Amino acid sequence: MSITLSFSQSGKQKELEARRVELRREIQKINTLVSSNKSKEKSQISLIEDLNYKVGVRKNLIKVTNQQANLLTREINTNQKQITALREELKVLKTNYASMIEKSYKNKNKQSRVMFLLSANNFKQAYKRIQYLNQYANYQKQQGENIKTKTKELQASNILLLAQKEEKNKLIEENKLAQKELEKEMKQHNAIMSSIKKDLKKYTVQIRAKQREASKIDKEIEKIIRDAIAKSNKKVGKKTTKTTVFAMAPEDKALAKSFLGSKGKLPWPVEKGVVKVRYGKQPSPIDRSIVINSNGVRISTSKGAKVRAVFNGEVLRIIKPKRSNPTVLIKHGNYITVYKNLGKLYVKPGDKVKTKQEIGEVFTHPRTGESTLRFSIYKETKTQNPASWIYKM
């Protein structure tokens, strides 16, 4: 019986460990952002958004750590069974080896060997008996080597099994600490929500006003894209300019194909940040009856963070709303990336930009200290989920 033990991390274990490291990094990033704005007067809405993000990531961290611990438990049980089987195999090997040594010792003297050879009926039989004695000696040596190998394998297996158990204990301890932090964050969350509920109407008005402002900018973006489509169609001589699809020159088609080929691998529009609001329809964290329709993602970053083009392209337009900060639109064939809430601009309409080229700086609110980039991706006039395009978003 031969058993090969492998105590190296399984593919699933490696995947879970990578996810756990990523979640811990996310918590560290939001903690860094929060601590850098500690002295500022952050709104209750922002505080709730921060806590919602931290609680969500913390719950995921606990879940992933539990999955790791459970997987380790299964691996430990399997390995213990294999070690038991290995011990049994070693026991049989040692018993057989002892019996063989005893038998060999009894027939050890040279006279016995000589008599064994001389008693052969002919030369052929004598030759075969010499071969047998040599094979038996080699077999003895091989059995001895097998015992050494199995003993080393068993020792190594025991060491690795102890390491697995230690790793599992560390995961359990880490989860206990994560649970305590989660309880603390939930208390903070509940205290702020209790304060908000006392004047919910005021906060609801603020949320709706922000939604109207965002919707106004989104409509302007859609109009700019439609105008660009009409212009592209007119350029190639199409009879009607009322369409939702770009008429592209060969170089634009190549750029669009390259952009599509980079789906899931595009760089972040800021070097460091966390996504506080994701794409799509979602309830407001303050008033669950209000549905927020997010056309992109909202990334919280650090003061003075540089905004980068996520791909090669051309600056289509720059919008400068009266009650908001500048928005930059960059065209990549029939795809458009949108960067909202910039404080400084490094580009102008018509500029050609490269991947990761700095196009401006995120605006930092002077009172709250918050630096937030709103980022969107469009294919013609249809919004896309940035998480499907940006690497590890």
Image (cartoon, rainbow, N blue to C red):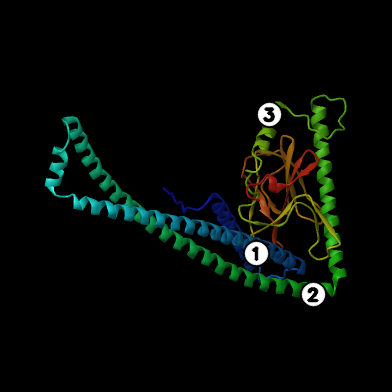
For disc 3, the neighbor class at 10 Å (few under 14, some 14 to 19, many from 20) is few
- What residue is shown at x 70% (from left), y 31% (from top)? 252
* Residue 136 showing in the rendered view: yes
Residue 47 position in % (x across, y down): 72, 68
Residue 14 on image: x %, y %: 54, 52
Number of callouts in the render? 3
Query: Viewed as shown, does residue 77 lie left or right of 242?
Result: left
Crowd rating for badge 2 (residues with CA inside 10 Å; few <14, some 14–19, many 20+): few
Residue 24 in view here? no
Q: Which mark is residue 88?
A: none
* 76 or 243, nearer to the observer: 76
Which residue is tagged 3?
251
Say which residue appears at 51% left-offset and 59% top-offset: 76
Sequence-first disc among 3 and 2:
2
The amino acid on which the numbered mark 1 sits, given as a three-letter code, is: Arg
Distance, label 2 to label 1, CA atoms, is: 22 Å
In contact (CB < 8 Å): disc 3 and disc 1:
no
Is label 2 or label 1 in front? 1
Q: Which badge, 2 or 1, is on the more N-terminal residue?
A: 1
Query: The residue under label 3 is which amino acid type?
Result: Glu
Which is nearer the N-term, disc 3 or disc 1? 1
Name the one closer to the observer, 79 or 241: 79
Contact (CB < 8 A) between labels 2 and 1?
no
Q: Nearer the viewer, mark 3 or mark 1?
A: 1
> What mark, if any, has residue 194 been given in the picture?
2
- In the drawing, does residue 137 fall left or right of residue 70? left
